[in-house]
């Protein structure tokens, strides 16, 4: 089952969309490598990863029902 | 609280709420809240905090009102352009609610003033516009154990979270470094001046900050403890993400006030702080305020000599790390045409980061003299 990826902030400009459907990945590291291959510009950008609405630290296992979000920091006030 | 008093009348519509009452209102009136940054977020948060009756509001900002602020910084009007934001904000908030004590700090938040100012308040609201200040405020709040109501905006999207408190003793409180442990270089992410922001967005997000602050003070509802809320104005999508404490965050926060004073937040984030070119009118207004240092960056021997106001001579060619000792928080730079002073302002901004505000006189001193003579 394909995996749903949500993009936030200026990542949507880089990828030209706010939602990407990716093929199933075992963990977030593998997912990111596939994503960087598809959108090389993302590799240069800072963002954090949330899996199923939890901010993650380090590589995180994914299920085929996981919803992954990529959130960049903002500084504007 | 006397039911026949003007104070009761002013707040009556929220006092009659079932879970609010006079007890919550009195908590608000006893509270002291510091809003850092009187920009888009700060303007919105300040108005509702003052209207709700927060007893003491501190406002810290060293900036002046500019025309490009007015689409989102709705405390200010055309007449306020060139005036210090904190002074105008205080005027407007006093007019809205004279029962609130407004304390202003016409300065920039930095290592040396953070502890002294933050320690006077119960809750800190971060409405700043750069990463260096955000990490600095976060670390000071962790060390002082102060709840921090964080928010930031970009283009059509905003983020809100409540840090350093959880409402219970079992849960560990998270902070900004748990959310973004890897310090972001200010050059990496476009700010409002570069990426743009729809004016109403900081209004919405700043109001959310005011709302979270009111919930923290009064105990109503469930604040965004250890939670990041994101709001997308275009799609109306709202998401909440749970933040978890991290070892990395713990290790990166200075452990003592002395260690905090040694932190170099501006280097860590390399704030780009685009040097502002200012027109003659603002240059003169800042100059006459007496709270600035004026620096002539022309080379020795360049004419005309300027004796109309006091200035320090620091030629652009001689600017280096060893001679950058200035006492003022705001530096006004000039040269003949404004080109070299702009370059000098970029160099000094790199060096001082958030510690100082640096302006370059647009058109240079020749333009200033011509304007003065005409």
Image (spheres, coloured by chain):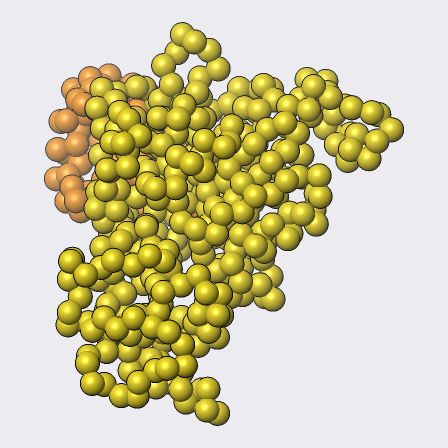
Chain colours: A orange, B yellow
Furthest residue to the top?
Answer: B170
Residue B316 in picture, x, y percent from top left: 19, 72
Residue A27 in picture, x, y percent from top left: 17, 21
Which image quarter: residue B173? top left
Furthest residue to the bottom?
Answer: B374
B164 or B161, nearer to the observer? B164
Residue occupying the point 59% across, 56% down: B88
User: Would residue B315 be found to the left or right of residue B180 on screen?
Assistant: left
Residue B269 shows up from this direction:
no
Furthest residue to the right?
Answer: B4
Residue occupying the point 46% across, 65% down: B290
Residue B278 in picture, x, y percent from top left: 40, 70
Which image quarter: residue B217? top right
Residue occupying the point 22% across, 55% down: B351
Residue A27 shows up from this direction:
yes
B355 versus A66 height, above or below: below
B295 or B135, nearer to the observer? B295
Which image quarter: residue B246? top left
Residue B367 in picture, x, y percent from top left: 38, 85
């Amino acid at each position: 089952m394909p995996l749903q990826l949500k993009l936030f902030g200026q990542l949507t400009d880089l990828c030209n969309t706010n939602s990407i459907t990716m093929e199933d990945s075992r963990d977030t590291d593998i997912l990111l490598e596939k994503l960087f291959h598809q959108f090389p510009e993302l590799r240069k950008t800072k963002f954090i990863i949330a899996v199923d609405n939890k901010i993650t630290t380090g590589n995180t296992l994914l299920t085929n029902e996981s919803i992954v979000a990529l959130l960049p920091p903002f500084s504007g006030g | 609280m006397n039911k026949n008093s003007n104070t009761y009348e002013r707040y009556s519509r929220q006092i009659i709420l079932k879970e609010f009452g006079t007890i919550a209102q009195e908590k608000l009136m006893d509270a002291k809240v510091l809003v850092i940054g009187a920009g888009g977020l700060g303007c919105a948060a300040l108005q509702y905090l003052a209207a709700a009756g927060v007893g003491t509001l501190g406002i810290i900002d060293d900036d002046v009102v500019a025309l490009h602020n007015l689409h989102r910084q709705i405390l200010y009007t055309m007449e306020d352009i060139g005036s210090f934001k904190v002074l105008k904000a205080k005027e407007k908030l006093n007019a809205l609610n004279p029962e609130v004590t407004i304390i202003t700090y016409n300065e920039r938040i930095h290592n040396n003033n953070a502890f002294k100012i933050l320690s006077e308040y119960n809750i800190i609201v971060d409405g700043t516009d750069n990463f260096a200040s955000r990490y600095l405020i976060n670390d000071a709040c962790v060390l002082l154990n102060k709840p921090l109501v964080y928010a930031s905006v970009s283009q059509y999207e905003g983020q809100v979270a409540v840090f350093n408190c959880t409402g219970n003793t079992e849960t560990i409180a998270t902070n900004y470094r748990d959310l973004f442990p890897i310090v972001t270089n200010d050059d990496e992410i476009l700010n409002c001046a570069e990426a743009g922001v729809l004016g109403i967005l900081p209004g919405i997000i700043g109001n959310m900050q005011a709302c979270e602050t009111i919930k923290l003070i009064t105990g109503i509802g469930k604040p965004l403890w250890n939670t990041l809320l994101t709001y997308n104005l275009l799609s109306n999508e709202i998401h909440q993400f749970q933040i978890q404490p991290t070892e990395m965050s713990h290790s990166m926060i200075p452990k003592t006030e002395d260690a905090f004073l040694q932190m170099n937040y501006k280097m860590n984030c390399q704030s780009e702080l685009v040097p502002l070119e200012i027109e003659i009118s603002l240059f003169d207004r800042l100059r006459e305020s007496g709270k600035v240092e004026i620096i002539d960056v022309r080379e020795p021997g360049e004419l005309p000599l300027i004796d109309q106001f006091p200035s320090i001579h620091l030629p652009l060619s001689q600017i280096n790390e060893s001679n950058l000792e200035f006492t003022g928080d705001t530096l006004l730079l000039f040269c003949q045409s404004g080109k070299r002073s702009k370059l000098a302002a970029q160099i000094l901004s790199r060096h001082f980061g958030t510690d100082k505000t640096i302006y370059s006189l647009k058109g240079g001193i020749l333009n200033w003299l011509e304007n003065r003579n005409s």
